[in-house]
Image: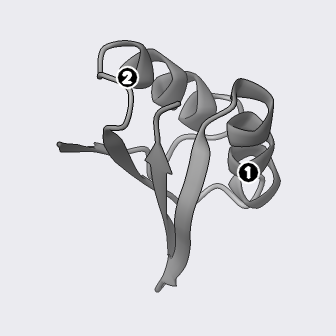
Amino acid sequence: MSEEIDATGLLCPLPVLKTRKRLKSVSSGAELRVRTDDPAAVVDMPHFCNEAGHVLVESVQEGDAMLWVIRKA
């Protein structure tokens, strides 16, 4: 199962807050794809995953945005 959030245009802490909220509604092992363009997300998203115990599967630069793939713990 894979879901996606478009958090482009949102600034810290909104991308992480939206990610946390969406992850609450998916089952363990599900992957969430999050697209951000906030420069702070480069620090915030890995930190959030580490603190919450989720797996940061992938982070890819796509033009002006970053795509994050997170697997729920």
Please indicate whether residue 36 sits to the left or right of residue 55 in the image.
Answer: left
- Up the image or down, 49 lies above or below 62; here it is above
- Label disc, if present, on residue 46 of the rendered structure: 1
Residue corresponding to mark 2: 22
Q: Write the residue at 45% across / 16% down.
A: 21
Write down the quadrant of residue 31 in the picture. Answer: top left
Hey, what amino acid is under mark 2?
Answer: Arg
Residue neighbourhood size for the residue with mark 2, other residues' Cα within 10 Å, grouped as few (<14), some (14–19), many (≥20): some
Residue neighbourhood size for the residue with mark 1, other residues' Cα within 10 Å, grouped as few (<14), some (14–19), many (≥20): some
* Rendering colour mode: one colour
Q: Position of residue 66 (x, y in %)?
A: 53, 69
Q: Write the residue at 59% across / 47% down.
A: 55
- Up the image or down, 70 lies above or below 72; here it is below
Dot 2 falls on a residue whose secondary structure is helix
Write down the quadrant of residue 14 in the picture. Answer: top right
Please indicate whether residue 47 sits to the left or right of residue 32 in the image.
Answer: right
The disc, 1 or 2, on the residue closer to the chain's N-terminal end is: 2
Dot 1 falls on a residue whose secondary structure is helix
Q: Position of residue 15 (x, y in %)?
A: 56, 37
